[in-house]
Amino acid sequence: MLQFDDKLLSLAEQTEADLREAYGKIDRLAFFNQKKVLEAFREERVSTECFNPTTGYGYDDMGREVLDRIYARVFEAESAFVRHSILSGTHALTLALFGLLRPGDTMLAITGTPYDTLQSVIGLTGEEGCGSLKDFGIRYEEIELTADSRLDRDAITNRLKKGDVKMVYLQKSPGYSTRRPLGNQVVAEAVELVKEEGKDAFVVVDNCYAEFCEEHEPPYYGADLCIGSLIKNPGGGMAECGGYLAGTKRAIDLCAQRYSCPGIGLEIGASLGNTKSMYKGLFYAPHTVAQALKTAVFSAGLFSKMGYNVIPAPEDARHDIVQQISLLDGKKVEGFCKGLQSASPVDSYVTPIPWAMPGYQDPVIMAAGAFTQGSSIELSADAPMRYPFTVYMQGGLTYESAKLGILAAASEVMAIEEQE
């Protein structure tokens, strides 16, 4: 049985009382985005025929084509494609990088070093000759954010003036750094800088964890492309695999040739019965993301009251579903993950331990008792085992179940505190 002591329950009750205004803002955001999604379904005249599976080449797959148009509408883009056969967020990002860049081009990351798993795609890590951008003669440069997590406008402008940058790349979520997540105002600022100095450079946004956390998505602000995974926000906890790309027609057409092959693009690709869960997931997504946002805010409030540094703070504006909690102690990280896992609907009896995961530079511990393997819209937490031993928690299909998970994690951390 899940049992918590009175001190923790009292702290949780006080935390929720302090967060009523924040919860109200999240509910209003969910309503805005739900209306946008519902209108897209209505405008594209979704019918049960859209859920019919196709096989083989998948020519004239009505469900596939309608869903692409719905994603374009929802993400306020000229074009989009979403496929169950995109294996992960990193795979979707790889399609974008290889779709838009050619030998001799320069990719400029303006939010610092990208997420660990993308570094081997670029060629910053991993073996030579594995097929990275570097192997194909594509140059990579990066500009760090300023100390207060803002774009370094002067450095970006000076680099763009050279005229050889083909792609300007932004990552909204912090990855395994301790910076703040970035909002779409940063995307708008980047687009402005590129238009002033970058000529034809693509603005590409890693949108993972950030969908439906604001009223608009990156293409609304002029981004050429935004990319994400369906086992994160836009899958709504219903899609069991897949990814999407949304942006300008030019960018999407180029990425489509990389997705399948030149000359075919988006004309083929059997749905194999996966379409309905993708439609249903997108429909659920605004509400499910709201549950995850409330979960993040609650965990920030509770752990800040326990004396830990949290990013974002409970009262901060939210730009993604990730909550950072710096525990400063590896044992507390393991305890947090153990507690969270114990209050999961799947594999609750498992104790997470750190291990050397492919694509990561440090041992990583993950708590993820999810219905879909790796789903980070479901309550989960992970942490690289390095100082300051920050846990990155995200997801929560329902606020109530996620609250139980956070209480279990907090209970384990408090037990370790008592032993110190």
Image (cartoon, helix red, strand yellow):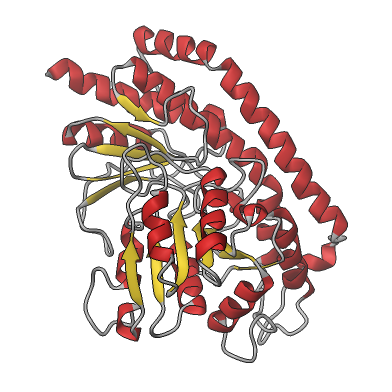
Using the image, determine if residue 387 lies above or below residue 222: above
User: In front here: 220 or 420?
Assistant: 220
- Of the 4 image quadrants, the one containing the N terminus is top left
Using the image, determine if residue 24 lies above or below residue 147: above
Residue 1 in sight from this viewpoint:
no
Q: Residue 405 at x, y = what percent?
A: 42, 30
Residue 23 lies in quadrant: top right
Residue in the image at 79% along x and 67% along y:
50
Q: Residue 35 at x, y = what percent?
A: 78, 42
* Residue located farthest toward the left when viewing the structure as drawn: 420
Q: Residue 364 at x, y = what percent?
A: 25, 50
Residue in the image at 57% along x and 22% along y:
22
Residue in the image at 44% along x and 47% along y:
173
User: In front here: 252 or 53?
Assistant: 252
Using the image, determine if residue 178 lies above or below residue 164: above
- Of the 4 image quadrants, the one containing the C terminus is top left
Q: Left or right: where does residue 72 sit relative to residue 135?
A: right
